[in-house]
Amino acid sequence: MHSIPRTADRKPLSLMVKSRVRSRVVFVDLIDISEGGCKIKAKSGFASIGDRVVMKVDGINAPMGTIAWVEGEFAGVAFEGQMHAAIIDHLCKQNGVSLSDFDPGKK
């Protein structure tokens, strides 16, 4: 599907996130997240490859990101830095995602 190498396993997370794309506020659904990026969903056309993204996830500032791919309503964000694994675990637990149900083999 995507030729972008992943440096960490993605963890499912269903959360509405306030973000900024092209200097405008966009509310997106955060579908999954890893230390190196995330998958988001919004209205088709909300972003283009190469756009810069700033997100605040449940009160926590995510690293600055860049749109790496777009498929309809979905887009992949590559973080410029890393989000610490403990923060991701905290977000998943706080939002009712069971990490024991997580399948790292799922792409």
Image (spheres, helix red, strand yellow):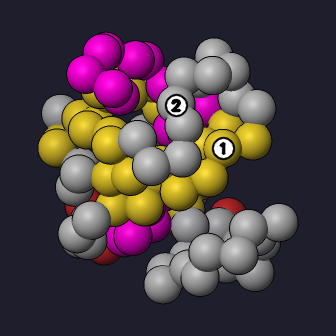
Indicate which disc, 1 or 2, sits on the residue closer to the N terminus.
2
Local SS, label 1: strand
Give yes or no for residue 37 being in the magenta stretch: yes
Please provide the residue range marked out in magenta: 21-41
In percent of the image, x 74 and y 68: which residue is there?
Answer: 2
Residue type for callout 1: Val
Q: Quadrant of residue 11?
A: bottom right
Q: Which residue is mark 2?
A: 47
Q: Quick check: 18 left or right of 60?
A: right
Crowding at label 2, few (<14), some or many (≥20) Cα neighbours within 10 Å? many
The quadrant the N terminus occupies is bottom right
Find residue 9 and report its horizontal and vertical position in percent: 55, 76
Find residue 21 and report its horizontal and vertical position in percent: 35, 28
Q: CA distance from mark 1 to mark 2?
A: 8 Å
Report if residue 86 is visible in the image: no
Residue type for callout 2: Ala
Residue placed furthest toward the right: 1
In percent of the image, x 65 and y 67: which residue is there?
Answer: 102
In percent of the image, x 54 and y 47: which residue is there?
Answer: 49
Placement of 59 over or under 25, stated as above or below: below
Circle 1/circle 2 CB separation < 8 Å: yes
Give yes or no for residue 13 being in the magenta stretch: no
Q: Which residue is mark 1?
A: 70
Crowding at label 1, few (<14), some or many (≥20) Cα neighbours within 10 Å? many
